[in-house]
Amino acid sequence: MEYVVVAVIVVLAALVGAAVLVAPKLRKRPPAPPEAAPEAGERAAQAPATATPARGTQAPPAEEAPPTAAAPVPIEEPEPSAGRLVRLRARLSRSQNTLGRGLLSLLSRDHLDDEDWEEVEETLLSADVGLEATAEIVERLRERTMVLGARGPEELRTLLTEELVAALDPKLDRALRTPRHGDRPSVMLVVGVNGSGKTTTCGKIARVLVADGRSVLLGAADTFRAAATEQLATWAERVGAEVVRGAERQDPASVAFDAVRRGREAGVDAVLIDTAGRLQNKIGLMDELGKVKRVVSKHGEVDETLLVLDATTGQNGLEQARVFTEVVDVTGVALTKLDGTAKGGIVIAVQRKLGIPVKLVGLGEGPDDLAPFDPEQFADALVGEAS
């Protein structure tokens, strides 16, 4: 029994001794081989995105990325105004069918009796030529066709074109009064009723003037519609022109005054002032328009007051023109949307009734679809080609 106890003790002592000898070896692992030092470029790439500031120092504020500037709108080069009416003659196709081709068809009949001449008269009236002008045109056509006797297509075309030109009164001065006056710019006031396309026409007029080599400044005196101001600013930006605007609901006369003053400072050739659209039967609004003109006149006379008329309104446009003329002395008419109506005779009616020349005609929605009015080119386009 004693031998067994002694044997167990010896075995235990051996195990303890072995454990004491092995443990230090397990704790002492060989060190890992050193890595190659990174190159300078690698060290930069391995550097943390933000450095930790030293204790006791304050980290500098993070730099903000600069705001992205809006890309500038490229300045456009408008089409030359000369010859635009010739280029846009196809836009008069609807009026051509009513006035030109319709009348040529009637006049080419072998014998024209009273009923035929009544048809000629109805054709002119349906094209909005007006009663007085229609009576004169029919009378002159009857006289000339009787003298001519047998008539060929080309003779009839020439005859009709000449009579329409005469009705359009080619002697009227249709030039826009926009030359600069020594130390001050010319001033154009653009007026019209709601929905006539006044602001768009104002922007297109700026393009006409720029195309003719004039420098322009636009005044956004329609302070009742924010959209009108933004629209005008877009038109100005596209031709590199400056626009003067006011706060919403600001007195339009003060904005117009500021625009003319700024135009003098900037040395531009012409200042175009877009006014708020108004109904001709609203006395308060019409009085306000008169005030705009009086205030602007403190810088010098308003050179041109251009009335924008919608050709599709027909004879109703005559009443609009009459009232505006009484308030601000309209000097010219810009007739818009003439490509969308068969009533091209409204040009004759406006001039004959009011003695106001049509100076510009709108023949489309494109930026350069506003053309200086020329009676010969217009009549030629209305009559069309002889068949």
Image (cartoon, helix red, strand yellow):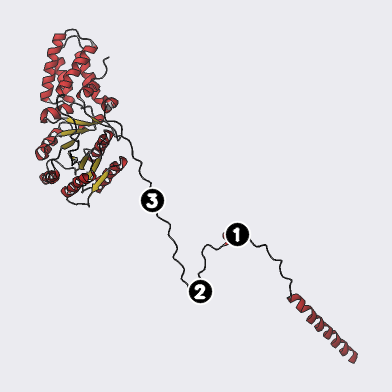
Question: Spatial distance from mark 2 to mark 1, Cα to Cα?
Answer: 26 Å
Between 246 and 139, the one lying in front of the other is 246
Callout 1 crowding tier (Cα within 10 Å): few <14, some 14–19, many ≥20: few
Mark 2 to mark 3 CA distance (whole Å)? 39 Å
| Picture coordinates of residue 210, whole percent (x, y) | 27, 36
Which dot marks residue 338?
none
The foreground one among 154 and 104 is 154
Bin the neighbour count of mark 3 within 10 Å (Cα to Cα): few under 14, some 14-19, many 20 and up. few
Spot occupied by residue 291 in the image (x, y as percentages of width and height) = 12, 46
Q: Which residue is mark 1?
A: 40
Residue type indicated by callout 2: Arg
The residue beneath circle 2 is 55
| Residue 381 image position (x, y, % from top left) | 25, 22
Q: Answer whether residue 189 is visible to the viewer in this image.
A: no
Figure check: 62 above or below 166: below
What element does badge 1 sit on? Answer: helix
Per the image, the residue denoted by label 3 is: 69
Q: Amino acid at mark 1?
A: Ala
Which structural element holds mark 2?
Answer: loop
